[in-house]
Amino acid sequence: MKLILCGKGGCGKSTLATLLARSYAEEGKQVLVVDSDESNFGLHRQLGLDLPEDFTHYFGHKKGIYEDGAADVFEGGWHLSDIPEEYSSKEGNIRLMAIGKIHDAGEGCACAMGSLNRIFLEHLVLEENDVCIVDTEAGVEHFGRGIDRYADAILMVADPSYESIMLTEKISGMAEDFGKPVFIVLNKVDADQEAMMRETIGNSDKIIAALPADKGILAAGLKGEALTAELPAIETIKKALAK
Ligand SMILES: Nc1ncnc2c1ncn2[C@@H]1O[C@H](COP(=O)(O)OP(=O)(O)OP(=O)(O)O)[C@@H](O)[C@H]1O
Ligand SMILES: [Mg+2]
């Protein structure tokens, strides 16, 4: 399964990506986490892994990536075992890749990273026991780039905000355009906020779980520590995805 996590800034995409990755790994799945957020540097810490070298560097430099050139490299498809070790960090059943980060002022835009992410996902071949979780940058640019076309499912994270409520409609529509199922997870909500969001969100039938604001997650986030929280909602999300 290729799963793309999306939502507005700070809603909890990377947190959910981490908790799901851990849970699938504990179950015995081989998990590839793809960090496709060019700006934020938090995901590897949440996973307790080193930040891997930018995958764009495999192609020389991000400016050197042209769609056809990169596609040639992946011809015939890439399995998890084809991912070069120098461009991933691994512990147990979890392997993390970072498509690329903006490191320096004036280095250019992130278009090459978006292209690479799309081509990579398109050519990634998963076995029965493999799960790929793609953590995206905030917003919907990845939809504009057509990256979500290569997912099996879209998991939208919605925090208690008007912006997230509005975004559920937009993302559902875009996922539908690609013929992809969308699942909504409410995050950092109390019972009142959950009820209000279930009432307000037009396609509330797509809400599969609601996570509370958790002190342990917040504390780990503040200290930049690995996430160890075990929330029952993660199992609920996995069950809904398995269907
Ligand atoms: N359920 C939760 N309970 C408490 N804190 C949470 C929860 N989910 C996320 N957080 C905190 O909210 C902040 C944002 O979470 P996270 O980095 O996962 O969001 P994001 O959507 O990936 O953000 P970005 O758009 O910047 O990539 C972090 O400090 C994280 O620890
Ligand atoms: Mg993030």
Image: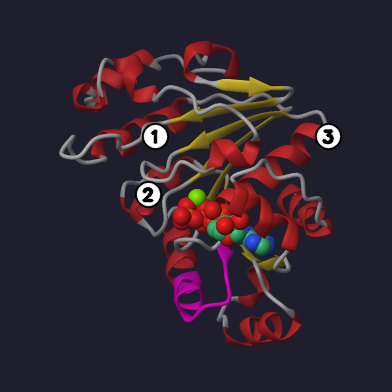
Distance (Cα) linking label 2 and label 1:
9 Å
In this rendering, the answer to whether 39 lies above or below 192 is: above
Beta carbon of the mark 1 residue lies under 8 A of ligand 2:
no
User: Considering depth in this image, is 213 or 117 the residue closer to the camera?
Assistant: 213
Residue 81: give x, y in percent of width and height: 59, 13
Magenta includes 164? Answer: yes
Looking at the rendered image, the quarter that the N terminus falls into is top right
Residue at (68, 74) in percent of width and height: 189
Q: Amino acid at mark 2?
A: His
Magenta includes 194? Answer: no
Q: Amino acid at mark 1?
A: Asn
The quarter of the displayed image where residue 12 is located: bottom right
Residue that carries the numbered disc 1 in the rendered image? 117
Q: What's the mark number on residue 27?
A: 3
**Sooner in the amino-acid sequence: mark 2 or mark 1:** 1
Q: What secondary structure prevails in the magenta region? A: helix
In this rendering, the answer to whether 125 lies above or below 165 is: above
Relative placement, left or right, of 80 versus 22 is left
Residue at (26, 40) in percent of width and height: 110
Q: In this picture, which residue range is highlighted in magenta?
A: 157-169
